[in-house]
Image (tube, grey):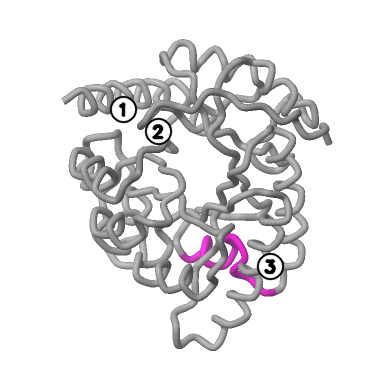
Amino acid sequence: MSKPAEASSPSPLPPFALGVCSWSLQVKSVPELKGFLDKLGVNVVQIACGDPHHASWDEGDDMPSAALAAGFRMTGAMLGFPGEDYTTPQTIQKTGGFGDPAIRAERLERLAWGLERTRALGLTDLTLHAGFLPEVDDPGRSAMLDVLAKAGDMAAAQGVVLAFETGQETAELLRRTLDDLKSPAVKVNFDPANVLLYDMGDPIEAVKILGPDIRSVHVKDAIRPETPGTWGREVPLGQGQVGIPAFLKALKSVGYTGPLVVEREVGDQQERFRDIADGLALLRSLLAE
């Protein structure tokens, strides 16, 4: 593991700085990532931690030092867990985040690794999927809250904020969970498309409900599923049901001014690059209005 970066005070990013998720570009090395960012005309990225089993880097444990030397700005890190299966909503419910009690201890160990990697990158934000949150009357809720509280304590000890991705539960349930946890180290990475993909309500209303705790944003678009229990369909930015102009307006209304990081998880590398470039162009146009 690389040593943590020396403390530094880079100039703050401007409001609504545009960026991209590294894993969306399916890159394997820091130079490849830098090349794509240059072509896209952005210098901001949310970067995958690079677990050997998930979005790995050719640089291995030297990735943090390579990324810090590359000259781009990183908004935070992303941690995926080995064994997560996004084939169907049912498979991710079984394998995602901290949902399975049998592997929670193992996932906490992987979280500890992710927190170390986040610090080595000189960052204070780590995004991940918590897993399906049990409803308030579910007998398994207490144990899930315990493990999420432990995760928050681990992050706080490292000076890191955990941002749980939206979508696998309603905004109301996530709001209740954050209120129950009362952890200053647990916040939200808001992805409006996930709300639609999992068919968990209206993403614009969800912004209003979760607004005070929105730490970071993935800008992605989707169409909700036609058949309950199946996935919705991710589509290029501006071609789905999120309503990107309304989404930006909602973010502004709750006081969010952080980066807008485009995520695209469908298509080969060339298709993703094209869709991300188009998405960035759309955002530039909307922000200029």
On the rendered structure, is 3 left or right of 243? Answer: right
Q: Residue at x 33, y 49 (%)?
A: 192
Which residue lies under the disc numbered 3? 150
User: Does 269 sit above or below residue 171?
Assistant: above
How far apart are labels 2 and 3 at the CA level? 30 Å
Tell me which label, 1 or 2, sits earlier in the chain.
2
Give me the disc on residue 90. Answer: none
Tag 1 near tag 3, CB within 8 Å: no
Q: Are marks 1 and 2 in contact (CB under 8 Å)?
A: yes
Place residue 244 in its image quadrant: top left
Q: Which mark is residue 262?
A: 2
Q: Secondary structure at mark 3?
A: helix
In the image, residue 274 lies at what x, y percent? 36, 21
Residue indicated by mark 1: 279
Mark 2: which amino acid?
Answer: Val
Helix, strand or loop at label 2? It is: strand
For badge 3, the amino acid type reads: Lys
Residue 208 percent coordinates (x, y) = 27, 58
Could you tell which of marks 1 and 3 lies nearer the N-terminus? 3
| Tag 2 and tag 3, C-beta contact below 8 Å | no
| Identity, as a three-letter code, of the amino acid under mark 1 | Gly
Q: Nearer the viewer, mark 1 or mark 3?
A: 3
